[in-house]
Amino acid sequence: MENQPRSDLPNKTPRPKGELEELKRIWATPRGWRIVTTVNNTEIGLLYIGVAFLFFLMAGVLALLMRTQLATGNNDFIGQELYNQMFTVHGTTMMFLFAVPAVEALGVLLLPQMLAARDLPFPRLSAFAIWAYVIGGLVFFSTILYDLAPDGGWFMYPPLTLKEYSPGDNADFWLLGIGFIEISAIAGAIEIVVGALRTRPPGMTLAKMPIFAWSMLIFASMIMFAFPAVILATMMLEIERSFGWPFFTAAKGGDSLLWQHLFWFFGHPEVYIIFLPAAGLVSMMVPTMARTPLVGYRLIVIALIATGFFSFGLWVHHMFTTGIPALSLAFFSAASMAVAIPSGIQVFSWIATIAAGRKKFRITTASLFILGFLFIFTIGGLTGVMVAMVPFDFQVHDTYFVVAHFHYVLVGGMVFPLFATFYYWAPQAGRSMLSERLGRWVFWLMFSGFNIAFFPMHLTGLRGMPRRVWTYPSELGWDTLNLISTIGSYILGAGVLLFVIDLVLHFRPGRGGPENPWQAGTLEWLPNDVYSNRSIPLVTSREPLWDQPNLADDVKEGRYYLPNAPTGGRETLVTSPIDAKPQYVIQMPTSGWSPLLAAIFTAAFFLLLTVKLVTISIVCGILAIAFCLIWAWALDPGPSKGLVDIGGGISLPTYVSGPSSHSWWAMIVLMFVAGSLYLSYVFSYLFLWTVSPDTWAPSGSPAPPDLGWPAAAALLLLAGSALIVLTERMLPPAGTKRMAVPIAIFLAVACLVGSLGVELAGHWRTGLSPTANAYGAMVYMGAALFGQLAFTLVIFGGFTIARHFAGKLDRERRVTFDNMALLYHYTVGQSLFGLALVHGFPRLVG
Amino acid sequence: MMRCCFVWPAAAILLFVVSGCAGVQSALDPTGAEAERINTLSWVLIIFCTAVFIITAIIASVALFANERWRQQLAGERLVIGAGLIFPAVTLTFLLAYGIFVLGMGGGSADTSDGLRISVVGERWWWRVIYRDENGRRIESANELRIPVGRPVKIDLTSADVIHSFWVPKLAGKLDMIPGRTNTLTLDVTSPGVSRGQCAEYCGGAHALMSFFVIAMPEKDFAAWLADEAKDAHQPTDELETRGQALFIASGCGACHTVRGTAATGAIGPDLTHVGSRHSLAAATLPNNAEAFARWIRDGQHIKPENLMPPYPIFSDEELASLSSYLAQLR
Amino acid sequence: MKAGNDNGPIAGAILFLLIGPIIWAAHLLLVYGPQSALCAFRIAGRTQVDPWLISMLVAGVTVIAMAAVMLTLWRPRRVARIFRFDAAANDNRSFILSSMRWLGVLALIGIALAGATTLILDPCAQLR
């Protein structure tokens, strides 16, 4: 095999002059105000983490205000209305605008370095997601300043959040804020899954992948399956609020528990989505501080995977008190016990690693935060075992005991590792280290403040204090405990403030920080610059810097793969997913306005829609799509650059299509997202049927249309799929055009739209209305999900046709077509299933 | 690090001792069968978790500070598999079995054949309480639940608007009140006395001010009380109270409130037939006395913001005095 | 330039690695779904399913799922062949193989704990 990594690396022949300068020029950061057009993940990632941290500070200020209100009983420092908004915004911000974006930011910031990749494969997608998040998040948070903030809790249970009980726009702002984080989380997940599997350096097999990459891979996979549930739930809630389709209204056959199922099917994995990357960071730092490889690497990978899986089987433990049968609760209690085991494995792996070092564990600020994390997270895990016991949860559910528990898990499990990360990886993003002296003060203030604030809450809860109360009577004996908690929260706040001071004094963003200050063993500590590493190393172990003593020099001198820019643009190496064999060189986009403008107009579209400025919002929506198309136009560069030599005797193509292409992989990830969204819909349909079978057709609603209607819709779909398959065969040879191609694509898209029309017309003719009852709402919701894909394909089809006329689509240069075809066939499959469900199920049970 | 690992549990225990477990709304001071079972479970869990935490802290301290020989004992996958996999797998199985066993004891025997049924309806932000005695007579009250001691009583829980949760920590765990569903909770009180309950599911606005008292009474007293409660309202005796009653009717209070035996038959707000005999006003937000009535009528929105009752600043002090003395005598 | 298909091997590898947890997830779906649906109908008075049958269903699915996981632990190479995963000796492959086994063990614990609860509890009662 010519592409087997060869052992004659490092290549000692000197590199040609000017090569490094060219790399620098190609990867240069845009200057001045044009910096906003940068798409390099390591640069835009810094904005990402910075904004996430800003949200942490702002939501933290809300927490301090709330603690001040609760310092004594019968206090009226903050009134009821503002308090209710504050805890909603605090929870929503911490979960959606801080925790998930922060770990995702660390992913895009650190993964390229850890994988010695020049960049992750979709830099513009990252830039788009980050800008959408920054704009949307800031607007959402600012609603607290003008009394427009949502006040339904971060979990937004209907019916409280329906129009009837929350008539203002407040709840819509919540749905808006969530919309942005949904977009950026999914975009980030695509980037990270494809990045971790395809842009590893040669030789870094799955068994040698850094634990952080494993944890981010699992994190991103979990987002793929967890977020669609909340996307569907938020869509349904907004539709019910705006158009009155009764998904959650009991009087019309809906059920508020449907929201709880969907929300927690997302919400529980969400906790682990936050925790796993942080655990991954700890698994990177502990070996460095212990100066020994991680004990139980394999067991930790297993623990991460098992946690990812089990976390999807826990959602009902947020619903133990809803009165569903005891046996159902018991299944989830069992799963909640099972998920404790992987956490146990990780904790003891870290302890074993600490013990394994020949010298004692180095106590730096980062290690203090790790030890603090171990301390706090262990307590949080143990109280997690307690609340997993159903009867115990009957008492403590929705009390301060639970508040204590999840702050131990989340602050312990995520914030402390994050601060360790700041102290440990500061040189990755800045020119200097943070202060170890101030750092110790930061740690001890935060650690003691945290425990003083949250430990007493266990008792406050057991003594009967519920959550989400803005005041409480003094005579119940909660005053002392609350006062202690409030004092603790100020100490914690002082610690965070001191950190901000340390940041201001010592953090200077830029390149050229101290090289490998902790003598770590992983690739992110290789010398790097805007282009990441000068050359991409051949990896032979888990701690390459410890095992290959000359690696840093060799990489810096360009003695490994891809020391230059053979295509003359930004590029990185794509390797095979399991064994990391080099496959091709991916040409990557450079800085540009389109992701930023697309994000601005996407944000404007949703914002203006929320405040009911429909016309301008539609204009913005069209502009957003237009900028996305402009950005997509530059993709799919075609095979014109031919084969390039990457060193080590390997020549690789610079363009591939088909199942090896990173773009195909991204499409597959997107289809998984769409698929789990649709499965959430199927679950909702069946769930509402079990709740209110009496509203179901044929007895409770008009009988479904004659079988001729779904048959016609299905035939149109199949015809469309056949047309796409035919088109693929007809793709013209390079450099030519063939009129049949655009015609066939047009007809295929027309079939899709026609099929949707037939489906809608069929139901409409029976007199079924989406607002009549839950059945009607569900039937039309199915069509809405079909319509969403059809709309995408109308645009995508038009785009593909335009590519053909521009001479950018042929038998070789075909990634655009392949992706459209994938999405098309997926849509046909989903819609056929939908037809069978919506037309078949009522006949089956009726 | 080592020192702090021992200081913390000690401080925690101290905290328990100092602040105690007692309280009218404390889950650690149970007087109901379910709460007692859960209390035992809680202490088993607290002791188990404290022990596990201390052992983990000791192991971590050895890994951090002990000499080479001790540390090498811990430095392998043996520790990970033993302490991280086998130990939790075994102990958690036992704990789970215990928890499921306690769960299985819930509900009590379904048979409370003497016919007393109690329904509690959660409303924003108060509790409608409906008793049905053995004769099927419907007796409505609000914001206070009275039950007999020594036998299980089934409470049907529903909601009139959003999700609420019925929780009396001294008696039992919480159970949600969900629109469109009826959940049934068994209360089996072991000794007479007063306990306090509170809404445990955020229901918007004045969720913090939605509480109530449960008064558990010996069987005989309960029967007598229920017979009294079923009667129509007390007629005013003195002149002040009579003026209050006239004002109550004339001001339209009856559009929302019922006072059985008078023209007031509203169903939107709490039934006031025997409001004077209750432990508290405004869903356990105010004490029950004439002054509190006056405050509530004049300025209820400051006491419980967003509640449905409009403030009545139009009443003069004398009018308020007569109204509140009328209401206070509705015993 | 259409490069060879990696999706086959990677999909096979993922399925092979995750077979234990996948069976665990299927088990949860197959015990929780029918149990809660049947109970909902029983409580609403729509069906007359014997509660004992529900318990048997849960127990049966549990036994089948546990047997399936044990089979994958006992004959991992056969499972590998089904998913067209090449488990031939190589550092990376043996890593995947042993990870698959450990995940199977954890899944087995999860399935056993969930299934065993049906031995204690009435299948539909609220028990409050």
Image (tube, grey):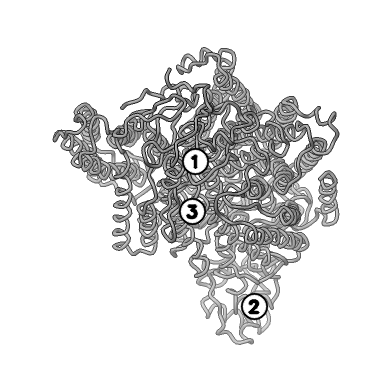
Q: CA distance from mark 3 to mark 2?
A: 33 Å
Which chain is home to disc 3? A
Q: CA distance from mark 2 to mark 1?
A: 53 Å
Q: Residue C49's x, y, as percent? A: 50, 28
Mark 3 near mark 2, Cβ–Cβ under 8 Å? no
Q: Residue B209's x, y, as percent? A: 63, 64
The answer to whether residue A3 shows anywhere in this view is: yes
Q: Amino acid at mark 2?
A: Arg
Which chain is home to disc 2? B
Does residue A661 appear left or right of residue B230 in this picture? Answer: left
Look at the numbered disc 2 and give the secondary structure of its residue: helix
- The residue that label 2 is drawn on is B295
Q: Return the disc, 1 or 3, that comes first in the chain's sequence.
A: 3
How many callouts does the rendering have? Answer: 3
Which of the 4 image quadrants contains residue A822? top left
- The residue that label 1 is drawn on is A223
Nearest the viewer among A560 and A382 is: A560
- The residue that label 3 is drawn on is A158
